[in-house]
Image (cartoon, helix red, strand yellow):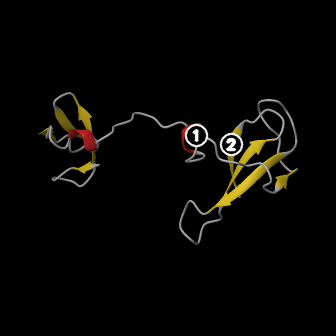
Amino acid sequence: MQFCDSCGSMMVSDGESMVCTNDDCGAQTRRDEARAAEFVSTDKQRDDDVIETEEGANFEGKPTATDVICDACGHDEAWYTIKQTASADEPPTRFFKCKECGRRWRGYN
């Protein structure tokens, strides 16, 4: 990740340049091709892209939640894991996998 020298905001790749994401700043620098392979820019990140870091994460055998409803199939049971995704004074996030259709989602307490 590259940060703006002027304001400290994150910069994104735009062709041959790196552009500051702060609309008030708008700084641009020439992209260093030697470091270009280190940078990945995304416009949007979907929830299903970040739920589990491993594609084949094994939920089977994990605790079962019966207080959730799968939006995809309406089933009322899902396996879940708990991870601390924010600071320690915030509640943990529960990650679910539907026992019926396999859909994954996250829940916040």
State the count of labels: 2
Label ID, residue 105: 2
Residue sitting at the far bottom: 89
Above or below, 47 against 109 in this view is: above
Quarter-wise, where is residue 40 in the image? top left
Q: Distance between the residues labelled 2 and 1?
A: 8 Å
Going by the numbered disc 1, the residue's amino acid type is: Asp
Looking at the rendered structure, which numbered label has been put on residue 3?
none
Nearer to us in this view, 75 or 91:
75
Q: What element carries label 1?
A: helix
User: Foreground residue, 25 or 19?
Assistant: 19
Dot 2 and dot 1 residues touching (CB under 8 Å): yes
Q: Which amino acid does label 2 sit on?
A: Trp
The quadrant holding residue 29 is top left
Residue at label 1? 47
- Tell me which label, 2 or 1, sits earlier in the chain: 1
